Image (cartoon, rainbow, N blue to C red):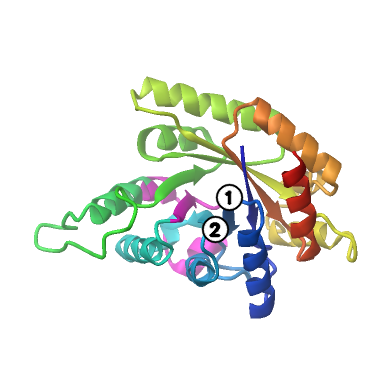
Amino acid sequence: MKIGLSLPPTTQSLDQFCEWVRRVDAGPFSTFSVLDRLVYSNFEPLVTLAAAATLTTRVRLMTEILIAPIRQTAILAKESATLDILSRGRLTLGLGLGGREDDYLAAEVPYKRRGKRLEEQMEQMKRIWAGQPVHANVGPIGPPPTQTKGPELLLGGYIPTTIQRVTHAADGIIAGTNDMEQIDKMFREVEHGWQEAGRAGKPRLVAQIDIALETRDVGQGRKNLLDYYAILPSFAASKAATLLTTEQQLSETMHALEQIGTDEVVFFTWSTEIEQIDRIADLVSSQ
């Protein structure tokens, strides 16, 4: 099982970002990921990963997750293909709908049709990456991505239609919860749907686990998580209640995830303490 690590959403400075990215790339980690919000003070994910591409040589670069429906599809396809080239084929697009209407209001995109729009976007991006015209007299749109079929597409979400979209149009799923039973259920449903759809190979099964290993500013990570999900109070409380804060909890979670066939776990860090990286790296290396 591979182990990835995210950029803390509250990262604000260039120096902090550069140090974090370099340490992740130098460690035993498989992936460096960033989240996406519009109405929040986080860095824009594709710009952030473009910067990360210049600072890294090894780790995959992943959006976790990118709210695709608030973006114009052809531009997103071109940006993603460009980033795939600049990273030498290391881009994974984790896509999702997002659960906050304010992001859609700010982007001036309808909130109610976002699921159908995501399906259309994935189909159109694949056509663009394959060099096909966008319309009868428009296109193609380049450049072609480094990865033959375009960046890997993973979907995040909690609703049944997410499973359906994964099994018909994506390469795998990101289960964004610390609830092991829910992760296992989602993985099994994806595998079943994959077989029912007659798709070759296996879906990628990725877990996103919320953590905050703190020594100096204990409790700040939990505060950051609650602030991020403040618009969804009950959901925020449930996320905060299951936040992992010790190496022992991480070790037990890694073992449990391996037992249910997880391909990769990305530890989503809510604390900005840089020392976390070394502590997690030591834990991963000792497994």
* Rendered residue at 26%/65% (across/down): 143
Number of the front mark, 1 or 2: 1
User: Which disc, if any, is residue 101?
Assistant: 2
The residues bearing labels 1 and 2 have C-alpha atoms spaced at a distance of 32 Å
Residue 140 visible in image: yes
Q: Position of residue 282 (x, y in %)?
A: 78, 50
Residue 13 visible in image: no
For this orientation, the residue located farthest to the left is 137
Q: Position of residue 127 (x, y in %)?
A: 24, 51
| Residue 172 falls left or right of residue 40 | left
Q: Quadrant of the N terminus?
A: top right
- Residue 114 sits above or below residue 38 on the image: above
Inspect the image, locate mark 2, and give the three-letter code of the amino acid beneath it.
Answer: Glu
**Which of the 4 quarters of the picture holds residue 241?**
top right
| Residue 47 falls left or right of residue 23 | left
Q: Which residues are magenta?
A: 90-118
Q: Earlier in the sequence, mark 1 or mark 2?
A: 1
Q: Position of residue 247 (x, y in %)?
A: 83, 46
Q: Secondary structure at mark 2?
A: helix
Q: Crowdedness of circle 1 by 10 Å Cα count: few (<14), some, many (20+)?
A: some
| Residue 221 falls left or right of residue 161 | right
The residue nearer to you, when weighing 262 against 165, is 262
